[in-house]
Image (tube, helix red, strand yellow):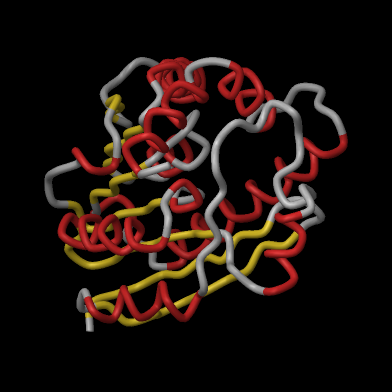
Amino acid sequence: MNVVDDKTVVREYFNATGFDRWRRIYGDGEVNKVQLDIRIGHQQTIDHVLGWLKADDNLSQITVCDAGCGVGSLSIPLAEAGAKVFSSDISEKMVEEAKERAATELGQGTNPTFSVQDLESLSGSYHTVICLDVLIHYPQDKAADMIAHLSSLAESRLILSFAPKTLAYSLLKKIGDFFPGPSKATRAYLHREADVVKILEANGWKIERNAMTKTRFYFSRLLEAVKK
């Protein structure tokens, strides 16, 4: 399956059965134990990013692109903290949900700005570009192209998360425990941290901060890269 086919599958999945599943996971309603574990892990990744950006104490002065924003789990608190946020997702349903949540939590307004776009079509220039839990949909060669594209949009900082490729995680994924659930219908690509760092360095970045989130069913490596 090539990346075009993968992208079509991802779009259709998150506009159908996947949307209902992940809206519950990213919400605060009742979920099963596996979904609760993934919710906790994802929120830990969000909290890491928010902690980093708030510690810099300049959110009100920067623009942020949340590439692959889902239901707005990061975009909304960033906007609430004062950042000018531009958010996008490949799924129209995800974007609609994000808009509704933003209106409920922030009131009617223009921040964040949401759009239905895949990563390849993103354009513009932003102080910080953030892409969380999206590279799992890209094989290694296409991930390199995508990181390069995101790099071209970021003026000062690029923050990425990805499912790390280690022997242990690869074995878990192979036996079906890494991303469990009968409604999962997209491929899950793992990436070696050394490969991701090499790609970032080739695009003019150096690693400033990093974090690892690990629960029973959620594994995510988080890297903050700044200009060399």
The residue positioned farthest toward the front in the image shown: 1
Residue 189 against residue 77 in the figure, above or below? below
Quarter containing the N terminus: top left
Quarter of image, res 107: top left
Residue 188 rendering spot, x and y as whole percentages: 56, 48
Quarter containing the C terminus: bottom left
Residue 62 rendering spot, x and y as whole percentages: 24, 53
Residue 226 rendering spot, x and y as whole percentages: 29, 74
At 81% from the left edge and 55% from the top edge, which residue is drawn?
A: 216
In this view of the protein, which residue sits in the foreground, 6 or 31? 6
Image position of 171 (left or right of 204): right
Numbered disc total: 0
Image position of 181 (left or right of 109): right
At 30% from the left edge and 25% from the top edge, which residue is drawn?
A: 116
At 41% from the left edge and 70% from the top edge, which residue is drawn?
A: 224
Image position of 51 (left or right of 159): right
At 50% from the left edge and 28% from the top edge, which residue is drawn?
A: 71
The residue positioned farthest toward the left in the image shown: 124
Residue 135 rendering spot, x and y as whole percentages: 44, 53
In this view of the protein, which residue sits in the foreground, 29 or 16? 16
